[in-house]
Amino acid sequence: MDDTLPGIRPRPSLWRRLDAAFRHGFPAGATALLLLLLAAPLDLPAQAELQQAVILAAVFFWSLFRPGSMPPPAVFLIGLLSDLLGLAPPGLNAVTLLIVQGLALKWRRKLVRQGFLVVWLAFLAVAAGAAALGWVVTSLLSWHAMPLSAAGFQFLLSACLYPALALPLTRAHRSIAAPERA
Amino acid sequence: MIRLSIPVRQAVAKLTLPVLITVAFGVMLLGKADAVLAERVRVGMGDLLAPIYGMLAEPMARLRGGVDDLRGLFALREENARLRGEVARLRRWQAVAVALEAENQELKRNLHWIPDPTASYVTARVVADAGGVYARAVLLSLGPQHRVKRGEIALDDRGLVGRITEVGARSARVLLITDINSRFPVMLQKSGARAILVGTNGPYPHLLYWPEGVTPAEGERVVTSAEAGAFPAGLPVGLVHRTAANIVEVEPFARLDRLDIVRIFDYGLHGILPPETAHSAIEASRAMAPVRTVERLR
């Protein structure tokens, strides 16, 4: 519970504390679960890229709007999990997501006050950077130029998916992930 | 919980991100330097997740089947007509095949042909898409006492799928023939020319290095070649297709985009296997230990 605000509030019973903890853990937990679910053989087209796009958007969104619920260690673990689920060089996604979080935290003060369009534009830059970093590191580590189209497609998918993901994420931000409503 | 003073807490909060980024970089370098460790962690992860995904796989397959059935209902008439035509065509081919098989048996008997040893196989369910943006692989769920080894060959009901690259206690990873790191010898069935099939991460691997004077014909069957001792000869791979840019691709027979169940064949071939990792070497020596004691007793 947010103890910094003055005012009268109900006594923190066990259930209330559990509720608050769940809400606090929701962003990171839901992102990790979604990641695991998207690794299952769902026969979705471009599932690997979809998986990357979803965690990128989730980490960016929560770092921007609720950084307390998406702490760096959680981002690190989510990144490492996604690396180990696939055949990516271990650590690559962890680095990418942590840099994304760093950028989001840095731009936070300016971006939170802006409308959706500006946030999306910022995300476009972040997604382009993430796709480029992934391509460069994978190519360097395997010493083999990976197809550039894959990186381009990954960027496009992330960019187009963000608005669709932002809607449920915003809803969750105001309801299920809000510890102050516990 | 340890109580820290506010400046210390602020400093820790500020430092977490840079420290974690450094750690992640370290993990990346460590993963490159110690590939064995990275593989072991990955295999452990697969072992942990494969049973969970395995439980999910059954209802998911049923759901998929239901959706397919529903779709099929709408196209029942055309489907029926198409299938009738196909049955008639295949009947003719069946007659040809039966006659050829009889002739083949007769010829083999006359030649005192030594038959190829029949390969043993196990069947496993594909439980996760384990590639990523820059790789093509799938995760298999296996029973706890499986005997699947690295280098064994995975086929679905239509053709070659890939090779086993990582084996855990309950899971195994198959590198698909479309992966950018997959390359293996194949044979063009009509001309008998050898070539190399090179994965591109796209749906259609490329055909490279065929001998001079041979042109892979559109629609020609591509099968595996026994060269390099990695595959037995004659496993169906796909059909040759020339793109508009005159790149020779192979359309795989196997439905690599929707793998459900694969068969893993042990042909006892160990060509072009990566060097044995320390981990598997230890396991092998453990497996060998009783044999050695028996030898000593003698």
Image: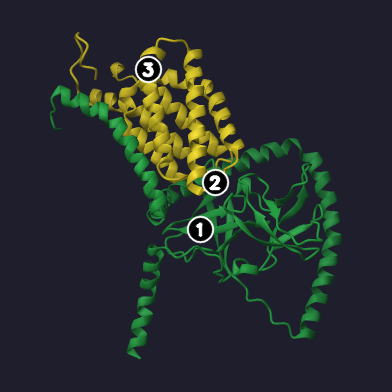
Chain colours: A yellow, B green
For label 2, the crowd category at 10 Å Cα-Cα, with few meaning under 14, some 14 to 19 and many 20 or more, is many
Kindly identify the amino acid type of the residue bearing the numbered disc 1. Answer: Thr
Q: Position of residue A33 (x, y in %)?
A: 42, 36
Rendered-image quadrant of the C terminus of chain B: bottom left
Q: Label 1's element?
A: strand
Q: Where's the N terminus of chain B, which quadrant? A: top left
User: In the figure, is residue B62 to the left or right of B95?
Assistant: left
**Residue that carries the numbered disc 1 in the rendered image:** B165
Chain assignment, label 1:
B
Element type at marker 3?
A: helix
Q: Residue at x 41, y 14 (%)?
A: A111
Q: Relative to B117, is B243 on the left or the right?
A: right
- Whether marks 2 and 1 lie on the same chain: yes
Residue A15, image quadrant: top left
* Spatial separation of the CA atoms under disc 1 and disc 3: 44 Å
In front of the other: label 1 or label 3?
Answer: 3
| Residue B218 x/y as whole percent | 81, 52
Q: Chain of mark 3?
A: A
- Which mark, by number, is residue A108? 3
Q: CA distance from mark 2 to mark 1?
A: 13 Å
Residue B252 is left or right of residue A170, and the answer is: right
Q: Position of residue B154 (x, y in %)?
A: 58, 59
Crowd band around label 3 with a 10 angstrom C-alpha radius: few (<14), some (14–19), many (20+): some
Q: CA distance from mark 3 to mark 2?
A: 34 Å
The image's mark for residue B135 is 2
Are circles 2 and 1 on residues that touch, CB within 8 Å? no
Tag 3: residue type?
Answer: Arg
Q: Which residue type carries mark 2?
A: Ala
Respond whether the residues carrying marks 1 and 3 are from the same subunit: no
| Front residue of A9 and A161 | A161
Closer to the camera, A30 or A60? A60
